[in-house]
Amino acid sequence: MRKLKATDVSDLVRILEATDAFTDEEVGVAVELLGIVLNDHTQQDYQVAVAEDNGQVAGYILYGPVPLTEGNYDIYWIATDPSVQGKGLGRQLMEHAETEAQRQGARMVCLETSSQGSYERTRRFYDQAGYTEESRIRDFYKPGDDRLTYIKRFSALKED
């Protein structure tokens, strides 16, 4: 895992588009957030880790502390190149974000996804990573498309 570089953006756009999981509008929002990370060095809301496979950009995760909460972090985006899916890079990205969040005082990590059938594989991935569905807002994105919130809670770190 490494930090985001400006030269990664075109590869990450290609990956986001190749997954066939995101609309053009969603890809635009993802790119906007990457731009914030790259261009606003004072912002503290978003952190990005980039994964490589054989020296090539293969995926990323964007996460950060939720403003006005105590120890709550969100995972906003995670995507891996379809050509490397199943190699464990997505899991490594999740573990990296969770470890960093805990190091920074996280009590829990939350993420949101859609109830649509096309997100079934994504939901299984979250289940396998130890996340549990905490809530469902029916018809959130559009009629018949619920917003599902998954969480993973962490034990408090004991002081020596």
Image (cartoon, helix red, strand yellow):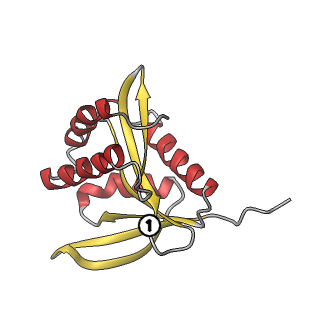
Farthest residue, direction top: 54
- Tell me which residue sits at (24%, 47%) in the image: 31
Q: Give x and y (percent) for residue 73.
A: 49, 63
**Is residue 3 placed above or below 42 in the rendered structure?**
above
**Is residue 2 placed above or below 93 in the rendered structure?**
above
User: Where does the C terminus fall, quadrant-wise?
Assistant: bottom right
Q: Give x and y (percent) for residue 145.
A: 21, 71
Toward the viewer: 70 or 141? Answer: 70
Does 14 sit left or right of 64 as displayed? left
Farthest residue, direction bottom: 138
Toward the viewer: 152 or 39? Answer: 39
Q: Give x and y (percent) for residue 146.
A: 26, 73
Please give the residue where the numbered disc 1 appears in the rendered image: 150
- Tell me which residue sits at (41%, 53%) in the image: 42
Farthest residue, direction front: 42
Does 53 sit left or right of 24 as displayed? right
Toward the viewer: 89 or 106? Answer: 106
Q: Quadrant of residue 53?
A: top left
**Is residue 149 placed above or below 1 in the rendered structure?**
below
- Tell me which residue sits at (57%, 50%) in the image: 100
- Label 1 CA crowd tier, 10 Å (few <14, some 14–19, many 20+): many
Does 102 sit left or right of 144 as displayed? right
Toward the viewer: 32 or 130? Answer: 32
Does 55 sit left or right of 95 as displayed? left
Secondary structure, mark 1, is: strand
Q: Give x and y (percent) for residue 152.
A: 54, 64
So how many labels did they put on this image?
Answer: 1
Inspect the image, locate mark 1, and give the three-letter code of the amino acid beneath it: Tyr
